[in-house]
Amino acid sequence: MSETEATVLEEIASSWRPPTVETARRVDPWASAAFAALLDADPPALDEGDPLPPLWHWFTLLDHPATAELGEDGHPANGPFLPPIPGRRRMFAGGRLRRLAPIPYGSLLHSRASVASVTPKSGRSGAMLFVTVRYELSVDGAPVAVEEQDIVYRSEPEGTPRRTIARPQGDEPAPEGEWRRSLATDPVLLARFSALTYNGHRIHYDAPYATAVEGYPDLVVHGPLLALLALELPRINAPDEHVAEFSYRLARPAFQPATIVAAGNRSGGQVEFAVAAEGVAPSLIGTARLTRDGA
């Protein structure tokens, strides 16, 4: 990272003033049924008033930018939470969820979103800006959840040599746990998840772009899909309990074609997760706290 790039990011971090964005959408069971079908999993109870599984509000609170507003990478060229970085590249780094009450199907879900922190950092891939976006969710004026998402933005101005990321090789054992779930990935699955989440990022469905422009060895498995796969473990194995808190970190990307293995180890009310492509160290590491009460 050059001194100039570092200075630019520091100036952005100190001067950028993103707005607060409020959204309200009806929680429709169709998207939940569609996601369960994508996983070949049994759907949750979908009647009006039944609770939405944790983080499945991602299928409700979707942005829908106009095609003319998209950049080369398929993401919006500009937006309220997109920092003005030259040659911006986006990576999902992790997040946290705190559940306060159920989100019922059929309810009107309100979101109040704002940037909680902006931190410039340097790494092997160059200058980066870590942005944490906080979502305060409510139903009928009552808080139901607080979510934070950590997004990393790399600066890659025009003329920057393209990085190349090799496909991970190794014979790492699959994650072990009393709870396990596997998911075979291919371009069709990734395209369907992109469509379900209205995610236009080309690294998930456009192989020539992912390899030639962004330097990946193949299509990238969505970070949110890895997080949702981890949460399938308590949903299926502890159906009478609730995820009160969930925290996760994305350590490395996973690439198709690969079978993704999610494993969970429970100790009392705590669950530790690891999600990895077979033969590779985990891409996601996380923890959750389970409870039997309404929150």
Image: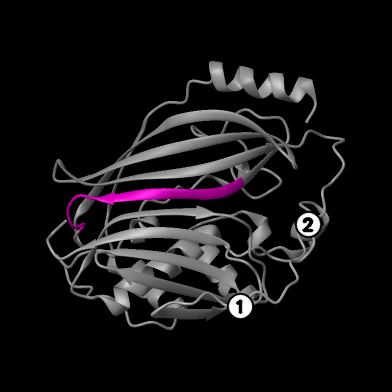
Drawn side of residue 70 relative to residue 271, left or right: right
Q: In this picture, which residue range is highlighted in magenta?
A: 91-103
| As drawn, 74 above or below 123 | below
Residue 55 visible within the image:
no
Classify residue 134 by image quadrant: top left
Label 2 amino acid?
Answer: Ile
**Residue with the mark numbered 1:** 173
The mark lying in front, picked from 2 and 1, is 1
**Residue with the mark numbered 2:** 165
Pointers 2 and 1 in contact (C-beta within 8 Å): no
Q: Foreground: 20 or 260?
A: 260
Drawn side of residue 142 relative to residue 4, left or right: left
Residue lying at 83% horizontally and 56% vertically, measured from the top left: 212
Classify residue 76 by image quadrant: top right
Q: Can you give x and y, in whole percent of width and height, for residue 135 in the image?
A: 34, 41
Disc 1 crowd, CA 10 A, few/some/many (<14, 14-19, 20+): few
Quadrant into which the N terminus falls = top right
Q: Can you give x and y, in whole percent of width and height, for residue 2 in the image?
A: 80, 26
Task: Indicate which disc, 2 or 1, sits on the residue closer to the N terminus.
Answer: 2
